[in-house]
């Protein structure tokens, strides 16, 4: 089936088109195996290979393959009326290479359509932007090289780990040559604009020749990510026509240049099961959007290429897309998190002095943000973190990580 494109010939060219920007994060960490004090100095195998293999297989079969197949069908059926963007962490790409090359091939097929954009990020989905400018540059450079080698792709738009962003990070990203960033709109930095209003317009970072910004429309994004299967939600059940009408209402209310819908890709099949109809909702959404001839799907780079930002997004302290506060406390709040982060980044000089690519790579994997998120006590007990964590408690996550780190320290200093 090929869906006929809407007739836009009668639209006043002086009227702005509202762009719908779909962006999905794909990330899998290398989870650590149970590593006790007595393993230190005895074993340098840190990762839970069986667990990583099992989880990647499950999520590939539930989400990545069926969702990629659906996106490919949508692109074939809707033609240029549907576009989408991804960032795929370096640790996820490595695991696809190791365990599921069929998933990697399915992403290649999507890229081959020319209607899918890949965003750059830190290779190890790390917090290096907060702790080491040198390591941050190394990881982004490494990630760009990975995209080139796997897909022959050159990314022009940047998204930092978990949308972590502030003015200093904008400067770092600009020095790396990126003119475009996706980030989270946080109330306290929006100059009296609501996140709903802010996420409808193009911003720029402070300074001359600063990067342009697309800010996430978190309410409408979370309607899909978190509320789609919630019977008590007033919007339940959600279908494509209803959702498109909400997009249209927002576009009119805010004179929106873009509506930016960013979410974890695992929403489609893993967090929201296929039996919920989540992929059917996704399939029919472009058709529902096309019913409004002044709305269209676009990639981040398409929106930002010609955009002229009207406002500055001035963010002196780091923000993210996590939790209600949209801050970085999920990774850095507790004493155990701070201790672990200080210890791992203190090793930078010693690791680099070794000159071993294997050790440098292992150090990178130990920086993956998930390790520190598992240590968070902020919301432990709400049922959400337990789903993502392989540990019984945040303290168990800390002890296990620090045992691994102790052995790694001995290795590089021995």
Image (cartoon, grey):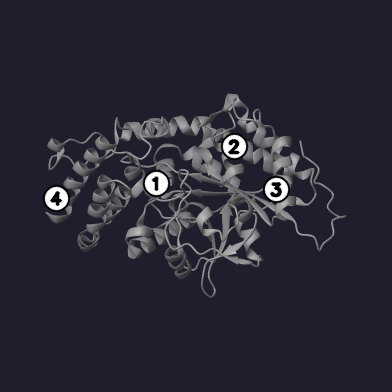
Residue 224: which disc? 2
Residue farthest toward the front in the current orientation of the protein: 192
Residue 250: which disc? 3
Residue 217 image point, x, y percent = 59, 48
Quadrant including the N terminus = top right
Instruction: Name the one closer to the observer, 12 or 248.
Output: 248
Instruction: Name the one closer to the observer, 405 or 77.
Output: 405
The residue drawn where x is 83% and y is 52% is 8
Q: Is residue 375 left or right of residue 227?
A: left
Query: In this orientation, does residue 184 appear?
Result: no
Under circle 1, the secondary element is helix
Which residue was labeled with disc 1? Answer: 91
Which residue was labeled with disc 4? Answer: 410
Q: Nearer the viewer, mark 4 or mark 2?
A: 2
Query: In this orientation, does residue 130 appear?
Result: yes
* Disc 2 crowd, CA 10 A, few/some/many (<14, 14-19, 20+): many
Instruction: Name the one closer to the observer, 144 or 215.
Output: 215
CA separation, marks 2 and 3? 16 Å
Residue 279 image point, x, y percent = 62, 32
Q: Is residue 42 left or right of residue 365?
A: left
The residue drawn where x is 32% and y is 39% is 377
Going from the N terminus, do you reach mark 4 or mark 3 first?
Answer: 3
221 w.r.t. 414: above or below = above
């Amino acid at each position: 089936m090929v869906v006929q494109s809407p007739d836009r010939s009668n639209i006043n060219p002086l009227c702005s088109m509202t762009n719908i920007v779909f962006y999905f994060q794909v990330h899998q960490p290398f989870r650590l195996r149970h590593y006790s004090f007595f393993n230190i100095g005895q074993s340098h195998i840190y990762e839970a290979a069986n667990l990583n293999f099992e989880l990647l297989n499950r999520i590939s079969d539930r989400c990545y393959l069926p969702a990629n197949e659906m996106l490919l069908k949508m692109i074939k059926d809707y033609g240029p009326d549907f576009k989408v963007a991804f960032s795929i962490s370096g640790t996820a790409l490595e695991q696809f290479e190791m365990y599921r090359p069929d998933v990697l091939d399915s992403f290649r097929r999507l890229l081959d359509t020319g209607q899918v954009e890949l965003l750059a990020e830190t290779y190890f989905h790390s917090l290096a932007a907060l702790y080491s400018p040198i390591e941050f540059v190394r990881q982004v450079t490494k990630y760009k090289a990975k995209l080139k080698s796997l897909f022959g792709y050159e990314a022009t738009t940047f998204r930092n780990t978990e949308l972590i962003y502030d003015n200093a990070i904008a400067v770092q990203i600009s020095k790396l040559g990126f003119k475009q960033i996706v980030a989270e709109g946080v109330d306290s930095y929006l100059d009296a604009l609501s996140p709903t209003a802010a996420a409808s317009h193009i911003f720029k970072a402070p300074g001359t020749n600063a990067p342009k910004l697309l800010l996430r429309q978190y309410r409408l994004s979370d309607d899909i990510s978190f509320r789609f299967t919630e019977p008590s939600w007033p919007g339940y059940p959600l279908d494509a026509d209803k959702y498109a009408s909400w997009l249209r209402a927002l576009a009119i209310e805010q004179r929106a240049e873009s509506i930016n819908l960013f979410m974890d890709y695992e929403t489609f099949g893993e967090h929201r099961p296929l039996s919920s109809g989540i992929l059917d909702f996704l399939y029919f959404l472009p058709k529902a959007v096309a019913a409004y001839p002044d709305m269209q799907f676009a990639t981040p780079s398409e929106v930002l290429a010609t955009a002229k930002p009207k406002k500055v997004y001035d963010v002196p302290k780091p923000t993210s897309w996590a939790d209600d506060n949209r801050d970085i406390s999920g990774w850095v709040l507790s004493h155990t998190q701070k201790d672990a982060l200080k210890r791992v980044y203190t090793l930078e000089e010693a690791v680099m002095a070794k000159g071993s690519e294997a050790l440098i790579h292992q150090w990178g994997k130990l920086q993956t943000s998930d390790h520190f998120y598992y240590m968070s006590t902020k919301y432990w007990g709400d049922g959400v973190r337990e789903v993502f964590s392989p540990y019984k408690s945040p303290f168990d996550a800390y002890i296990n990580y620090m045992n691994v780190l102790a052995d790694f320290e001995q290795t590089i200093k021995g």
